Image (cartoon, grey):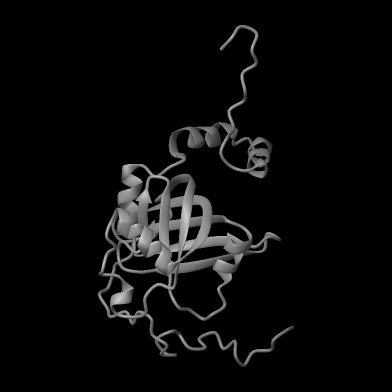
Amino acid sequence: MKEGAIAKPIALPGSDGEHALQEKYNTTPRAQGFYRHQVLGYLNPMMQAFVSKQEMMFVGTADKHGESDTSFRAGLPGFVRVLDERTLAYPEYRGNGVMSSLGNISENPHVGILFVDFTEAKIGLHVNGRARIVENDEFLRDAAASEPLREDNPSAAGRGAELWVVVSVVEAYIHCSKHIPRMQKINEEIQWGTDDVRAKGGDYFRAKTSPRTR
């Protein structure tokens, strides 16, 4: 640095709101330690291996007004593809037709993904980034050019992916294991792509016969 030059402040991860609350509640030193030691702007090899083994994840999105939605996604291990250290992709299968997550992404590309391993490592991984929607044919064509797609995915037993969400990674960091419950995986048949009402949960919460408003 030249003599007399002013050093540019290092931008901290996170929002202005969280930084303000850290100051208010005196957690800044702890937060800065976490930022410094745990937050990466890419998926390191351990994170990539972790993602490639996961069978489920939670996806948070918001529309252009900030109205939020959280959805659950699942598949066989590897259903979320790590394309490189800064890019992952996950398939969108035929659902209820609402397309709430995809609709949000079409307005607002910011997305937050949480992977949780309840059965082995008992640890979680946050991945925040910018998402875009890619047509299935386009994704398969581009992916096949670099690496063959796995065949043992839900499309082998049910409907294939209709779209893909490609996420450019901005932040990746641990979700601590302290309060993650240990669970046991039970082998059972999963009816991928089914339209069977009972298999899909039916009207479990009796919403169909509940008043529309209160």
Q: Name the side, left or right, on which 129 lies relative to 6.
A: left
Residue 103 pos. (x, y %): 59, 68
Residue 95 pos. (x, y %): 48, 79
User: Which image quarter: residue 17?
Assistant: top right
Q: Residue at x 43, y 84 (%)?
A: 200
Give 186 or 156, whichever is nearer the viewer: 156
Q: Name the side, left or right, on which 169 lies relative to 77.
A: right
Give 174 or 4, whichever is nearer the viewer: 4
Kindly tell me whether residue 97 is visible in this rendering.
Answer: yes
Kindly tell me whether residue 121 is visible in this rendering.
Answer: no
Q: Residue at x 55, y 67 (%)?
A: 102
Residue 54 pos. (x, y %): 34, 60
Give 193 or 36, whichever is nearer the viewer: 193
Residue 152 pos. (x, y %): 25, 70
Q: Quadrant of the N terminus?
A: top right
Compared to residue 168, the image places residue 154 above or below, namely below
Q: Residue at x 36, y 42 (%)?
A: 44
Q: Name the side, left or right, on which 40 lies relative to 155.
A: right
Q: Quadrant of the C terminus?
A: bottom right
